[in-house]
Amino acid sequence: MSIWRRKTAAEQIGDVLPEVFPRLWRYSLSLTGNRDAADDLAQAACLRAMENATRFAPGSGIDAWMFRITHNLWISTLRKTAVRTGGGLVAVDETVVEDPAPGPERQALNREVLRTVLRLPEAQRVTVILVYAEGYSYREAADILDVPVGTVMSRLATARAALGQKFRDQETQDAR
Amino acid sequence: MQDRHFTDEELVAYLDGEADHAPVALIDAALERDPVLRQRVRALGLDTLALRAGYETLLNPAPASIPAMQTTGNGWLRSTSVAAGIALAAGIAIGVLIPGGKDDGWTEYVAAYQALYSSSTLSHISPVPSDQQRELARVGAAIGKPIDLARLTAFPDAEYKRAQVLSFDGRALVQLAFLTSTGEPLALCIIRSDNVPAGQPDTREMEGMHAAKWSDGTYEYLLIGGSDDALIRRMSSGFADTGV
């Protein structure tokens, strides 16, 4: 028998916080569309994770669990406030994607792809970000978003068709 | 042989390497001989590398709330160790909280939470009094207590920044954030607690920060943050004497 006691869930959260917090914040930014609201959401999610630490089942991914908390918090409370105060659906703030000093073409492309993704409807946007930017599997993304895998697949297919269309239109325009 | 029709979902799962969700071998074979299918797959292409790289830039500038990564300015190693220290401090505080369930567990909580704050969490906020009034009305309603902006702006050494509602154990908790003239974040936290006797500010150290706790019989207050003990004493007795 090991003399070391197992780490508590709360200690595990403490361990991963420096790595996970920036990712939760960035995900929050893609949900809320502005930095202040992202601060609030990511912090509230960390607080909620600490409060519910005992409910975390060790063995499963603690980061995915925290993403799930962030998403639930957004759906259950903060989105309602944002929609009320914003008078409609939350649109991602254009200023979120900073225009850095003129750089290589590649950076411009990266920004353009991100901008286009951030303009997708929320359900598609979060699914694309979890799978392609955060690297979660379909199964993990479905768990985080609390939807069936089939829903993840159809959101990704719709998003990719729309994004492909957009970039094709742009190429045609640029070629003129 | 006529290939069966593949849905966009299947083709995307194929592109994403999700073999459980795509008939990979069938699509591979069909792609060999079907130019229309190749066209469809191309149309579903997404530059995920560009997306990932663009997404990285969202952290630049870094979120205000990762204290260790922004404020030390002393290189990565130091930043990482400070970040680990903060997480450890938070972890210890939480560890104490969970099994104990002490009456004043909320203050430990606030302390762990406050440890995540840095000057840059608040420095970008330029307060507009009319907005602050509205915000205070909103958060005050959450705990059933009017909060007077004039009381919060009465201290020359600490600028009142913003208010938010947090929750502890299902109870609403108002956090009023200040930034001191030396750039340290402070928070005045208020929670409704009917069964705690009124008492004057009692100073203490929590998570390496100075703090003061008091109660007016209906609400409990915790002022916490920074290293200036005298400022915490001055502000807490000011708030306790005249109300918030």
Image (tube, grey):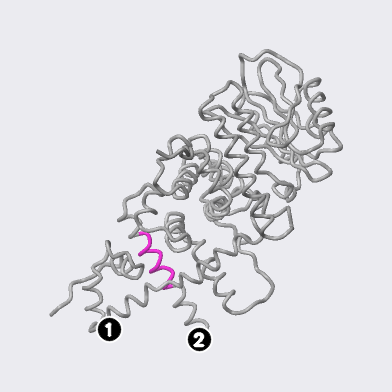
Secondary structure, mark 1, is helix
Q: CA distance from mark 1 to mark 2?
A: 24 Å
Indicate the amino acid at tag 1.
Answer: Pro
Q: What residue sits 52% from the left and 54% below the top?
A: A27
Residue A58 percent location from the top left of the image = 41, 42
Marking on residue B118: none
Q: Are marks 1 and 2 in contact (CB under 8 Å)?
A: no
- Which residue bears the numbered disc 1? B35
A164 magenta-colored: yes
Q: Quadrant of the N terminus of chain B?
A: bottom left
Q: Nearer the viewer, residue A112 or A106?
A: A106
Residue farthest toward the right in the current orientation of the protein: B156
Q: Secondary structure at mark 2?
A: helix
Relative depth, front residue between B118 and B35: B118
Residue, disc 2 = A175
* Image quarter of the C terminus of chain B: top right
Tell me the magenta residue range. Answer: A155-165
Q: Is residue A154 left or right of residue A25?
A: left
**In which quarter of the view is residue B15 placed?**
bottom left
